[in-house]
Image: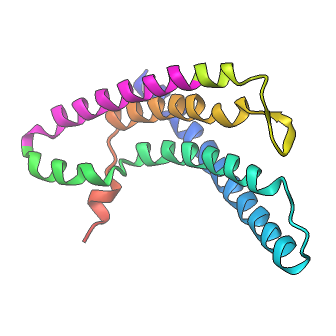
Amino acid sequence: MKQKFLAFERVLSAIIFRISCVLLGVVSVLGFMQVLSRFVINRPITWSEVLIRMLLIWMIMLGAVIAFREGAQISLDFMFRKSGRFQRPLHFLISVVCIVYLSVLIWYGADLAWRTRFQEIGSLEFLPMSVGYAALPVGAFFCVITVIANFLDPRRNELETQQ
């Protein structure tokens, strides 16, 4: 069961990583287009800034999935170094706290996305506001999966690569 879950999580994390990379590329191209249109052509694209903001939110929430999986919570490195034989109980406590926090984010993020499903974004009339807010529960849900995976198969890349 554990191996199947970790195999599922590996595939999921790989897909999320690729999506995040694509979003970074799209944001970069849109930002470049915005600068060109505003300062070179003197005709700013009205919708690009809002779309960039929304894509950045999605990219950050999906990027957090990878950070949780890799154990890249930098502020916790010190605790792991000093905990010695208490690393496993500390890791369990940290995982529980993260899951509780992410569960709150899922609950209220889903509620917020549901409440804004009929609102339109100012310059993007074809997209409801809930598309942007949906990044919170979706990203947090995937983060819960990777927090569990990191507990089952710990990775602390920040600890191992720090000099």
- Picture coordinates of residue 94 (x, y %)? 26, 34
- Quarter where residue 95 is shown: top left
Q: Position of residue 105 (x, y in %)?
A: 48, 28
Exactly how many numbered labels are in the figure? 0
Q: Which residues are magenta?
A: 85-109
- At x 70%, y 25%, the residue is 116
Check if residue 11 falls in the magenta segment: no
- State left or right for residue 44 relative to residue 137: right
Q: Nearer the viewer, residue 127 or 43?
A: 43
Left or right: 140, with 80 as reference point: right
Return the x and y of residue 2 as percentages of the image width and height: 40, 25
44 over 132 or under it: above or below = below
- Looking at the image, residue 72 lies above or below residue 163: above
- Please indicate whether residue 83 sits to the left or right of residue 30 in the image: left
The N terminus: image quadrant: top left
Q: Quadrant of residue 109?
A: top right
Q: Residue at x 28, y 66 (%)?
A: 162
Q: Residue furthest bottom?
A: 40
Q: Position of residue 92 (x, y in %)?
A: 24, 30
Main SS of the magenta part reads helix
> Which residue is rendered at x = 31% and y = 51% of the image?
156
> Which is more toward the observer, 102 or 108?
108
Q: Is residue 127 left or right of residue 137?
A: right
Look at the image and name its color scheme: rainbow
Asked if the stretch drawn in magenta spans residue 86, the answer is: yes
Query: Considering the image in quadrants, where does the C terminus appear?
Result: bottom left
